């Protein structure tokens, strides 16, 4: 039977165990990379053996966070912990067989699926990295520059540099602790939020030309063929958080961005303003997330997936 843990209980759980193998999710973002790196660094600081299991989808934008922390696979006797993984199908495909072996899940998604014996899930945390930070502080870890930067990347990217509605006072307290510990806040913000590549600008221009506006501009739907991404030469770093772009257009309250993946799926990302619920749309497709940001995947061609999403958006975003 699954048991939900408090921060203190999660800290005790980790204190009592060793040889940690830490998992991040498919199509990794800054939070799953930052939180997995932070947990690994903090556990090592406390004298534990800890590694992050290699995720082949980590983009160059975030690879530096995992440098020196990874190993290729889980070994016998490892305590497996997942970070920011809301559902079993969010694990990288070559790690899905580990679902029944994960000892602890650390997550912050309110619509997450329970799939481990122990879990700590706090929907009030704006990022998983904040939750990892709290647990490590309970364990007596001390922040250094590397740990601080891992936590900061997770917290800042999942809040849009502290602009999204999920940002709470605790988020700022966490960021302040990162700054006090020596994190390069200016440099990180420049790299993560102030620098645009030509590829990103090209895909943004394509979205403006091709997105579909519904209900007099309150809803936006953009389906991006894989062929377009290849033609424009965009990378995964260029596409990072691209789903927030349609939502940033004046008047748009709920936006859906669909992408074709290399393995034949359609990845869907939903964004919503306060008062609207992106997760209510995502759960219709077996996904989840937060009211402001959610996602799901469909084993359907892009055109068919877009038709289904449009229908659900019109129903679920009154």
Image (tube, rainbow, N blue to C red):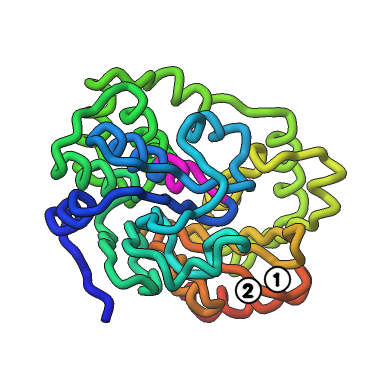
Q: Residue at x 74, y 34 (%)?
A: 199
Q: What x and y, as percent, mark residue 267?
A: 64, 63
Q: Is residue 227 left or right of residue 273?
A: right
Q: Residue at x 22, y 21 (%)?
A: 180
Q: What x and y, as percent, mark residue 257?
A: 63, 58
Residue 306 marker: 1
Write down the residue under mark 2.
309
Q: What x and y, as percent, mark residue 276?
A: 41, 65
Q: Is residue 230 shown in magenta?
A: no
Look at the image and give the residue range highlighted in magenta. Answer: 28-34
Quadrant location of the N terminus in the rendered image: bottom left
Q: Nearer the viewer, residue 210 or 27?
A: 27
Find residue 293 and report its image quarter. Answer: bottom left
Q: Nearer the viewer, residue 154 or 102?
A: 102
| Residue furthest front as drawn | 76
State how far apart marks 1 and 2 are (Cα). 5 Å
Residue 187 position (above or below residue 317):
above
Is any part of residue 96 visible from this angle? yes
Q: Residue at x 14, y 44 (%)?
A: 138
Q: Is residue 139 left or right of residue 67?
A: left
Q: Estimate how packed mark 2 is, as few (under 14), some (14 to 19) or many (20 or more) residues with alpha carbons within 10 Å.
A: many
Residue 138 position (above or below residue 218):
above
Q: Is residue 235 left or right of residue 50?
A: right
Q: How many marks?
A: 2
Q: Considering the numbered disc 1 on the image, is that residue within a helix, a strand or a loop?
A: helix
């Amino acid at each position: 039977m699954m048991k939900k843990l408090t921060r203190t209980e999660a800290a005790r759980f980790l204190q009592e165990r060793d040889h940690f193998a830490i998992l991040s999710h498919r199509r990794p973002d800054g939070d799953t990379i930052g939180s997995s790196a932070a947990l690994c660094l903090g556990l090592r600081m406390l004298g534990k053996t800890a590694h992050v299991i290699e995720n082949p989808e980590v983009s160059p934008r975030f690879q530096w966070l995992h440098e020196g922390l990874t190993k290729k696979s889980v070994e016998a006797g490892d305590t497996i912990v997942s970070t920011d993984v809301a559902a079993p199908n969010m694990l990288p495909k070559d790690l899905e067989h580990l679902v029944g072996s994960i000892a602890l899940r650390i997550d912050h998604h309110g619509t997450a699926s329970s799939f481990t014996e122990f879990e700590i899930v706090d929907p009030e945390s704006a990022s998983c990295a904040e939750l990892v930070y709290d647990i490590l502080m309970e364990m007596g870890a001390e922040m250094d520059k590397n740990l601080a930067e891992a936590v900061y990347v997770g917290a800042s990217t999942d809040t849009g540099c502290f602009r999204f509605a999920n940002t709470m006072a605790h988020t700022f307290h966490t960021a302040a602790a990162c700054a006090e510990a020596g994190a390069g806040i200016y440099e990180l913000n420049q790299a993560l939020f102030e620098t645009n590549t030509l590829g990103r600008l090209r895909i943004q221009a394509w979205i403006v030309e091709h997105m579909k506006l519904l209900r007099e501009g309150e809803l936006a739907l953009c389906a991006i063929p894989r062929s377009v991404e290849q033609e424009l030469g965009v990378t995964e770093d260029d596409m990072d958080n691209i789903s927030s772009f349609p939502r940033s257009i004046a008047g748009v309250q709920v936006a859906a961005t669909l992408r074709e993946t290399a393995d034949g799926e359609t990845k869907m990302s939903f964004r919503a303003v306060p008062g609207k619920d992106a997760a209510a749309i995502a759960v219709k497709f077996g996904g989840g997330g937060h009211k402001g940001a959610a996602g799901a995947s469909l084993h359907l061609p892009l055109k068919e997936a877009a038709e289904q999403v449009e229908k659900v958006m019109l129903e679920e975003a009154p």
